[in-house]
């Protein structure tokens, strides 16, 4: 091989690297025993302040929810512990069935006709929905509401750059109505939006349908157990970040993206689809279906490029939904809603603090602070509280606070007490 590429030794492959950077002597301490190392790492880890050990009101797309112990036990089973796609149905019936159950639950949650068995996470799922819309109606303009998560918007910009899709931002429903045209492929909306408030999906749907454009909704999965799902507003595509469904924040991943749409669009839908069938002996079984959309068959012409899959994370979401049931997931949603509204009523009464945005919100809202949110978060951390997400770049002195069923009344009251003592 070396002769074929014209070098005499392995060292020649690295001759362009300055010698001082090739195998330098590293200033590292002497080796330590595993026991000593474990003790040292434990000591360092105790310096962290982590959610669960102290109250946390940080959300902005990644949330702490209680996960039943049964969920971890199910996903830890050796039969499921793999990221690989079950191409061979005869040896993967269990995994395929969990994918089918995931799809069924997603359809029930979103109010849509068909769903795939998982995307990588919520942001790329929304971006893929924009590409799917362009494939469906051959238009090249996408409108996004500016209340979508700025992190999601960054991902969307990356996805639409290469296909030369025009991205237009609408600042309000009135602005959307003035900007939408016959060139608009779809309108992207987040509900609840990044600031926690519910969008007027009925008005957005009416505007979108007047121009034969598609409405794509990114929705929080827990909120859909309490509020009307996007499917009830005639959404064409619904996506979601499934992290809330029994998956820990875990430094940002791995997560699972939820993707559902109207049945007539399923051949343009990305991601794997599990179908139920019968074999030659009339036994029920499960297979990957509509595979001609996928990269291992269509290559560069594929509408789906999900390869190493998120089946294990989707299984976690499936087990979570199965363990809680319809009543359980609704109860979680109600707890999140009422805790957030209790906190809002308390914080709004503190001099210097206000809630600048008005409307119906779910489990998050923005507060306007009398001083920098960065300073407030430092004060909160000194008092063993992890504060909210700093959104000063979007709202002056704005802080986004999140509340879930894990936040107790005592924790909320402690937050209010410390905020009320802040001098400005």
Image (cartoon, helix red, strand yellow):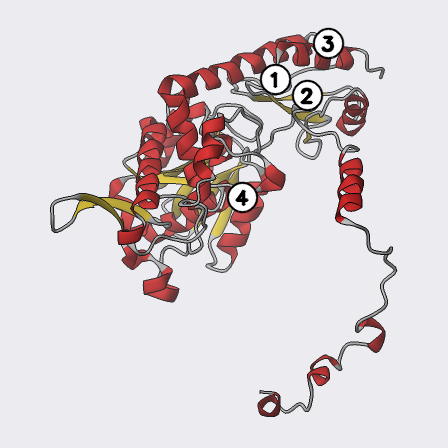
Picture residue at 41% right of the left edge, 53% below the top: 140
- The CA distance from mark 1 to mark 2 is 7 Å
**Residue situated in front as seen by the camera: 5 or 302:** 5
Q: Element type at marker 3? A: loop
Residue plotted at (45% across, 50% down): 83
Q: Which residue is mark 4?
A: 254
Q: Which residue is mark 3?
A: 350
Residue 105 at x, y = what percent? 34, 32
Rendering quarter of residue 235 = top left
Q: Is residue 286 visible?
A: yes
Which residue does the numbered mark 2 point to in the structure image?
A: 55
Q: CA distance from mark 4 to mark 3?
A: 39 Å
Dot 4: element: loop
Q: Give whichever of discs 4 and 3 has the lower sequence position.
A: 4
Above/below status of 388 relative to 43: above
Image disc number at residue 407: 1
Percent position of residue 244, x then y: 50, 30
| Residue density around tag 4, few if under 14, some if 14–19, many if 20 or more, within 10 Å | some
Q: Which residue, as the protein is rendered here, is positioned at the far left?
A: 281
Q: Give the percent coordinates (x, y) of residue 142.
A: 45, 46
> Gap between marks 3 and 2, in whole Å?
20 Å
In terms of sequence position, does the residue under pointer 3 or pointer 1 come before the other? 3
């Amino acid at each position: 091989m070396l002769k074929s590429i014209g070098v005499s030794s392995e060292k020649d492959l690295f001759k362009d690297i300055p010698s001082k950077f090739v195998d330098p002597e590293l200033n590292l301490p002497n080796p330590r025993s595993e026991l000593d190392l474990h003790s040292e790492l434990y000591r360092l880890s105790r310096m962290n302040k982590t959610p669960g050990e102290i109250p946390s009101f940080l959300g902005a797309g990644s949330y702490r929810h209680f996960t039943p112990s049964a969920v971890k036990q199910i996903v830890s089973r050796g039969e499921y512990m793999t990221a690989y796609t079950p191409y061979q149905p005869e040896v993967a019936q269990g995994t395929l069935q969990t994918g089918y159950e995931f799809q069924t639950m997603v359809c029930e949650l979103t109010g849509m006709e068909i769903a795939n068995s998982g995307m990588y996470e919520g942001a790329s799922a929304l971006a893929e929905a924009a590409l799917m819309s362009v494939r469906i109606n051959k238009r090249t303009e996408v409108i996004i509401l500016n209340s979508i998560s700025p992190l999601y918007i960054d991902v969307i910009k990356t996805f639409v750059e290469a296909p030369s899709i025009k991205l237009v931002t609408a600042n309000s429903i009135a602005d959307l109505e003035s900007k939408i045209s016959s060139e608009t492929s779809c309108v992207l909306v987040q509900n609840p939006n990044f600031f926690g408030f519910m969008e007027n999906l009925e008005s957005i749907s009416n505007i979108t349908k007047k121009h034969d454009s598609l409405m794509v909704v990114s929705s929080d999965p827990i909120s859909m157990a309490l509020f009307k799902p996007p499917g009830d507003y005639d959404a064409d595509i619904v996506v979601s970040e499934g992290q809330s469904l029994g998956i820990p924040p875990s430094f940002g991943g791995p997560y699972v993206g939820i993707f559902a749409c109207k049945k007539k669009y399923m051949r343009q839908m990305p991601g794997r689809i599990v179908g139920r069938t019968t074999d030659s002996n009339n036994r029920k079984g499960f297979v990957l279906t509509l595979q001609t959309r996928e990269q291992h068959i269509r290559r560069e012409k594929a509408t789906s490029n999900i390869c190493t899959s998120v089946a294990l994370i989707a299984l976690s979401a499936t087990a979570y939904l199965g363990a809680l049931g319809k009543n359980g997931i609704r109860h979680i949603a109600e707890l999140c809603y009422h805790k957030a509204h209790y906190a809002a009523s308390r914080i709004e009464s503190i001099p210097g603090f206000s809630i600048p945005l008005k409307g119906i919100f779910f489990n998050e809202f923005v507060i306007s602070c009398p001083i920098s949110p960065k300073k407030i978060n430092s004060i909160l951390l000194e008092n063993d509280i992890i504060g909210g997400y700093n959104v000063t770049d979007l709202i002056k002195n704005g802080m986004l606070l999140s509340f879930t069923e894990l936040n107790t009344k005592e924790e909320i009251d402690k937050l209010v007490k410390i905020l009320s003592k802040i001098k400005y």
